[in-house]
Image: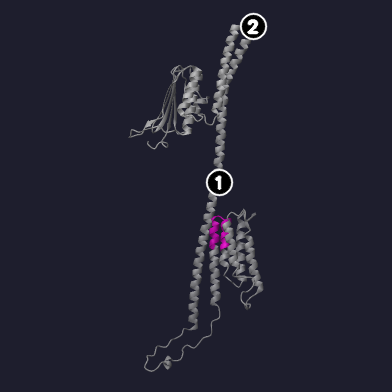
Amino acid sequence: MSRLIQLQTHPFRLLLYLEWILLGIAIVPRPPFPLDRFPHPNFEPLSLLLTILSIATFGVMGLRLPKGKLLSKVLYTGVGFGLILLAIFAGSQDVRFFPSLLLILVIRSCLIFGLVGRLIVTGLVFISALLILFLQFQNFHDLPRPPKEPMFQAPISEHVPRGFPVPPPKIPLHPDEVATGKDQKLLNLLLNVAVLFGLVLVFVLLLINALLAERQSKQKLAIANEQLRQYARRIEDQATLQERNRIAREIHDSLGHSLTAQSIQLENALLFLPSNTDKAQTFLQEAKRLGKDALQEVRQSIATLRSNPLQEQSLEDAIASLVEDFRRTTGIVPECQINLSFIVPDSTLKLSLPLPSEINTAIYRITKEALNNIYKHSEATQVTINLQANAEALCLLVKDNGRGFHPEENTTGFGLKGMQERAVALGGKFNIVSEPETGCRITVYIPLPTLYPYS
C-alpha cells in the first residue's frame, strides 16, 4: 500500500530538501521554549507540546507516501490537513507556520495524485489559508479597545502670543475611528498575504508539474530506447537467420550437388580401375574438377560472412577481382565498364567522389550474386557489366545472353530477393527483365541526393 522514501531512492531530491527546509521554517517561529525573558501570560506548555507533536507527525508522514488505491491517498491528505489545523489551533491560532505546512501538503499531493487531484488539493489549501487569515482578522478585531479620551484639548489661543494668527483647533479622532483605520490596514495586509500565497501555490504547482512531466518524458524515452534496442536485436537476429538460411541453401544446392557428383565419379573410377585404367582416369579427372568446384563454393560461402567483403579495396578493384574470378571459372571474359566520375551540372568540373561503404558493399554483393547466377544457371557466352555514376544516382547493369527464365516463376531462390532487398534498403530500385532463350538483364538504380549537393 505504501513505499518508504529514502534519500537514495527519492524521485526528486530537490523536493525532499525543499520539504525539510519548509519544515524547519515551520518549527523555528515556534521553538520549544518561549523566547521572552519572562513567560507570556497565555503560555501553556501542553498546547505548545501538542503543536510540536502535530508538526513532527506531519513531517514523519512524508517518509511514506500512499500508493495504489485512491481511498488511501485521500485519507493521507485528510490526515495531513487535520494535523496542520491541529497545530494551528493548539498554538492559540498562531498562523506564522501554516504557509510552510500547506506548501508541503501541496508538494506531497503532486507526488501521489494526478493533475485533477493536484488541482483539488491546491484549491482546498488556498481556501484553508483564506479561512485561517479570516479567523486571525476576527481575533484581532475582537481585542479590547483603549479607553476613551477627551474629545477636545485646551484652546490653542492661550498659548499663542498676541498679534499672531490663531490656527484652527485640532480635533482628535475618536478611538473607534482609529480602530477602524487599523482594521482596514490589517485587512489590506491579510489580503496581500492571501494573494501572495496564492501566487506561490501556483508557482509551486507549475514547477512540480514541470518536474514530473520531465521525469515522465525521460522514462518514456528510456522505454522507447529499450524497445528500439530490442527491435534492433530482433532485426539483427532475423538478418543473421536469413543470411544463414541463404548460405545453407547455397551449400545444399551447389556444394551438396558437387560432392554428390564427385562421389559418383569416384565410385565409377573404383569400378573401372581393375579393367579399364583409361576410363578410370577420366572419372578421376572429373572428380578432381568437381572437388575444385566444391572448394570454390566453400570459399564463396565464407566470403559472404565477411563484414567488409571489399577488404579495403576500391569498388573498381573489387569488381575487377570478381570479373577475373569469373573468367578463370567459366572461361568467359565479361565486358566491364566502370565510370564513377561525373560532370557537375552547369559547369565543366569533373568529380570522382568516394561512395559510402554501404553503397560499395551493396553494389559488390549485387554484382557478385548476378555473376554467380550466370555461372550456375544461364549457360551464357557473353556477359556485360556497366556501372555509371552521375550527380543524381548510381546505375548498375548486368546482362547476359544465356537461356533466360521467367522471373515470376522463381519464388524460392534467395539470390534475386537478396539483390532487391539490398537496393531497396538504400532507397533504390531493382529491375530484372528475362525471357526464355533471350538472356537476362538486371538493372539497379541507387539515388545519391544526400551525397552530392550539386544535384
Please provide percent x and percent y for residue 121. Answer: 55, 60
- Residue 382, picture quadrant: top left
* Magenta highlight on residue 107: yes
Q: Is residue 32 left or right of residue 193?
A: right
Going by the numbered disc 1, the residue's amino acid type is: Ala
Q: Nearer the viewer, residue 388 or 211?
A: 388
Residue position for label 1: 222
In the displayed orientation, state which residue is furthest to the top.
Answer: 275
Closer to viewer: mark 1 or mark 2: 2
Mark 1 or mark 2: whose residue is earlier in sequence: 1
Q: Which quadrant, please, contains the N terminus?
A: bottom right
Going by the numbered disc 2, the residue's amino acid type is: Pro
What span is colored magenta in the figure? 103-123
Q: Residues within 10 Å of mark 1 (few under 14, many from 20)?
A: few
- Residue 273, picture quadrant: top right
In this rendering, the count of numbered labels is 2
Let me know if residue 266 appears in the view: yes
Please provide percent x and percent y for residue 287. Answer: 58, 14
Residue 441: mark in rendering: none
User: In the rendered view, would you say 155 is above or below 372?
Assistant: below
Q: Which quadrant, please, contains the C terminus?
A: top left
User: In the rendered view, would you say 322 is above or below 455?
Assistant: above
Q: Main secondary structure of the magenta part?
A: helix
User: In the rendered view, would you say 272 is above or below 42?
Assistant: above
Q: Are marks 1 and 2 in contact (CB under 8 Å)?
A: no
Q: CA distance from mark 1 to mark 2?
A: 76 Å
Please provide percent x and percent y for residue 218. Answer: 54, 49
Residue position for label 2: 274
Please provide percent x and percent y for residue 446. Answer: 43, 31
Residue drawn at 54 percent across, 26 percent down = 303
